Image (cartoon, rainbow, N blue to C red):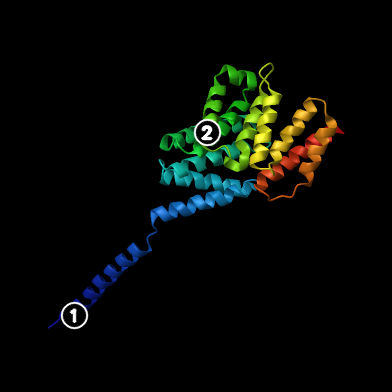
Amino acid sequence: MRSPNERPARLLVFVLLMSSALDATAAPDPVSSLAEKLAQLDALHDRRDDPAALATARRLADAVIAQAPGDYDVLWRAARVLFTASDEPGAPAAERSRLGKQGYDVALRAIGANPNRVEGHYWAALSIGSYAEEMGVLHALAAGIEGKFKRPLERATALDVAYDHGNIPAVWAAYYLELPWPKRDRARAAQYLRQALAINPANLRAHLYQARIAVDEHRPAEAKALLAEIAAAPIGRYDPPEERRVKKEAAAMAAGLR
């Protein structure tokens, strides 16, 4: 004869077993979960000029680094987020420098995880550039920052010069335009800008730098034509946040030419 408590006990065991099985089935696959987060970071990068999107990206970057601290695809995306935050117009110089250094350190970790892909090297170069801005060009050169900028950018150039919509040659052009005399080299910068436009004819920043060279070389009509071309360009041909930012910078430059 069954004990009065036997059936409830058996039901309890059954419920517990089923609960364990359901928990195992419902538990997210950590790999696919991480992949989804990385896809979300990419989507947020496409909206990075929205402060809310950038804030979300920063929180998510912290989360994925905590989840997978040695993963290359995590690290270079986190470096990209930190550089983006360091490059925010109007941010205090000290904050830009701090975030740039953080981005550089994370990018170096990415390079350590996989030195044969372009992303880590590229975001390392851009991030150390943000870090150096507060110092000024001369102090940065004296502190040895130039090598920390050039080495990863040279490696990124060798790995995939077309990365980030053809911006690698544009970064080189900016470097040669920012150097103090006698190291400044507008002719070499112009050569890099032609390369950037050969890769991506829609690259507005390349046109902006061409306009800057025209201004510096006292060719205002050419500069105005280039700036008008930027103003008329439609948004969405390659990188909407970057396109919108360049349009604002071009408008400010055009206003200074009147």
**Residue found at the far right of this picture:** 258
Q: Which residue lies at the image location 79% right of the left edge and 25% below the top edge?
A: 217
Q: Position of residue 87 (x, y in %)?
A: 63, 36
Residue 5 visible here: no
Give the number of the mark in front: 2 or 1.
Answer: 2
Instruction: Calculate the distance from the C-alpha at mark 2 to the C-alpha at mark 1.
Output: 78 Å
Q: In which quadrant of the rendered image does the C terminus lie?
A: top right
Q: In which quadrant of the rendered image does the N terminus lie?
A: bottom left
Badge 1 crowding class, 10 Å Cα cut-off, few under 14, some 14 to 19, many 20 or more, is few
Vertically, is 67 above or below 185? Answer: below
The residue closer to the viewer here, 159 or 94, is 159
In the structure shown, which secondary structural element does the residue marked by tag 2 occupy? Answer: helix
Q: Which residue lies at the image location 72% right of the left edge and 33% below the top edge?
A: 209
Quarter of the rendering containing residue 225: top right
In the structure shown, which secondary structural element does the residue marked by tag 1 occupy? Answer: loop
Quarter of the rendering containing residue 230: top right
Task: Name the residue beneath numbered marker 1.
Answer: 4
Q: Which residue lies at the image location 85% right of the left edge and 33% below the top edge?
A: 221
Vertically, is 237 above or below 184? Answer: below
